[in-house]
Image (cartoon, coloured by chain):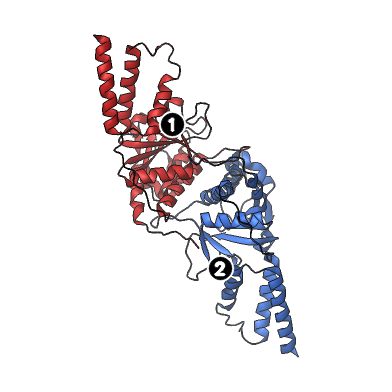
Chain colours: A red, B blue
């Protein structure tokens, strides 16, 4: 009877994992998310432009988890909420036309806890109740996380989605399989963004990218480097190449 | 990247699995449970003595899953709600003083879907919001199902608990491991209850059990036969023994 351990020493790693909610409309869902997190041992809640917060309904639904609301970081941008994170997983209800590396919630949780075990900060990003994540937000994610649902009725409540993901994070730390530390010294979110801006600027400089008609060039490049989980030293090399390229073109 | 299949042929087995809620106080939780079930493909909801039902708040929280509320079976007793079920799994927040066979939600879901695959009807029973299952209700269960939670804050919302269990049921059917059919022709809930009554009566008849001071005799016996998942033919033999015993004593 494989009852899992309640007091795994790995559970402390949940402190490295944050939940990011973007532009949540219903304050009750923020409260439900806080409760869902706390009951599974998560504590770091980031709110990007919440429509109503703080709010009595959030506090009511949080039940005894209102300390997470008090300590929640309210951010103006997603970039700010991802500060320091080197692994970003975005929850997505829809399967997009542009394919992005996709994991089910269980596999995503295992990646997340393995990264935390390696000392990385990890973000799980949840989009708006009705429209989810924009393409721009999606492009910040290394992987999309998908919770399998009924094809005829896939209306998973935001709080319920946070519950399932938080549960999977806890389960992956209670799992009897050893956590495999990942080796790389990965670039964090700011470093990657800065690289993408540098890359885009350079591609425009060399005339490869037409700002008036960019197509999906940057998106596809982001997907590539995100999937590869680019390391810091690799990024330094790439940036060195870009700098050199720009020098040549501008000369 | 192990993304699971969305359209496993096994998903039909969810039709053999019912969710039973006992004496739910908040109609909103009934609605949330219906939504949690439907989004994972479950459809059979049983309500034992709900405090307020039907109710506008249940319908509101069910969102598009109000068809499950319309079709819900409202029952006067747990016995009625378990009619025809040969595997009963009871969700329990607390770990009891009397040890009962315990499975985590993932293992319980696997047992449940394996039983459904063998043509059995399966019930997952959730107790009251604050006090859970009584000992008498617990004794109807073959196994207790436990969702691992934070030791310092284990206040899992009822709707959230149904969400996690429904998710695990769906995941176990999407899992790539083959479902192992269980072989036995198990006794159903009524047959077991009838046997337990017969057994208790017989134990009183033979003077083994003092109705004024029953201790935990029947509970321990229930635990034994439940854990063994007694088959129909075995039960017939046991009942034959009881009948014979009673004849002897009464003679």
Residue lying at the far bottom of the rendered structure: B251
| Percent position of residue B18, x then y | 64, 53
From what the image shows, is residue A228 above or below residue B130?
above
Classed neighbour count for the residue bearing mark 1: other residues with Cα under 10 Å, few (<14), some (14–19), many (≥20): many
| Percent position of residue A250, x then y | 26, 10
Residue indicated by mark 1: A23
| Quadrant of the image occupied by residue A137 | top left
From what the image shows, is residue B31 above or below residue B192?
above
Q: Quadrant of the C terminus of chain A?
A: top left
Separation of marks 2 and 1 at Cα, in angstroms: 45 Å
B50 vs A74, left or right, is: right
| Percent position of residue A152, x then y | 63, 37
Classed neighbour count for the residue bearing mark 2: other residues with Cα under 10 Å, few (<14), some (14–19), many (≥20): few
Secondary structure of the residue carrying tag 2 is helix
Residue indicated by mark 2: B135
Q: Are marks 2 and 1 on the same chain?
A: no
Residue at 38% across, 13% down: A208
Q: The numbered mark 1 sits on a residue in which chain?
A: A
Is residue A101 something one can see in this rendering? Answer: yes
| Quadrant of the image occupied by residue A49 | top left
B179 vs A159, left or right, is: right
From what the image shows, is residue B153 above or below residue A192?
below
Residue at 58% across, 68% down: B227
């Amino acid at each position: 009877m494989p009852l899992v351990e309640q007091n795994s020493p790995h559970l402390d790693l949940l402190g490295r994992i944050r939940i990011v909610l973007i532009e949540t409309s219903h304050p009750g869902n923020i409260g439900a998310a806080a409760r869902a997190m706390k009951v599974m041992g998560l504590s770091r809640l980031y709110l990007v432009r919440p429509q109503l917060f703080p709010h009595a309904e959030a506090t009511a639904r949080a039940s005894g988890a209102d300390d997470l609301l008090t300590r929640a970081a309210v951010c103006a941008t997603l970039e700010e909420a991802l500060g320091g994170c080197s692994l970003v997983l975005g929850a997505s209800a829809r399967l997009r036309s542009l394919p992005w590396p996709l994991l089910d919630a269980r596999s995503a949780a295992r990646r997340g806890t393995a990264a935390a075990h390696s000392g990385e900060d990890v973000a799980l990003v949840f989009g708006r109740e009705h429209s989810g994540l924009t393409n721009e937000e999606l492009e910040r994610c290394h992987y999309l996380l998908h919770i399998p649902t009924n094809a005829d009725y896939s209306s998973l409540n935001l709080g319920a989605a946070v519950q399932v993901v938080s549960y999977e994070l806890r389960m992956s730390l209670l799992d009897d399989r050893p956590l495999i530390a990942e080796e790389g010294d990965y670039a964090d979110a700011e470093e990657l963004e800065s690289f993408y801006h540098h890359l885009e600027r350079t591609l425009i400089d060399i005339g490869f990218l037409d700002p008036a008609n960019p197509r999906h060039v940057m998106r596809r490049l982001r997907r590539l480097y995100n999937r590869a989980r680019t390391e810091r030293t690799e990024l330094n090399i790439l940036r060195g190449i870009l700098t050199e390229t720009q020098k040549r073109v501008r000369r």
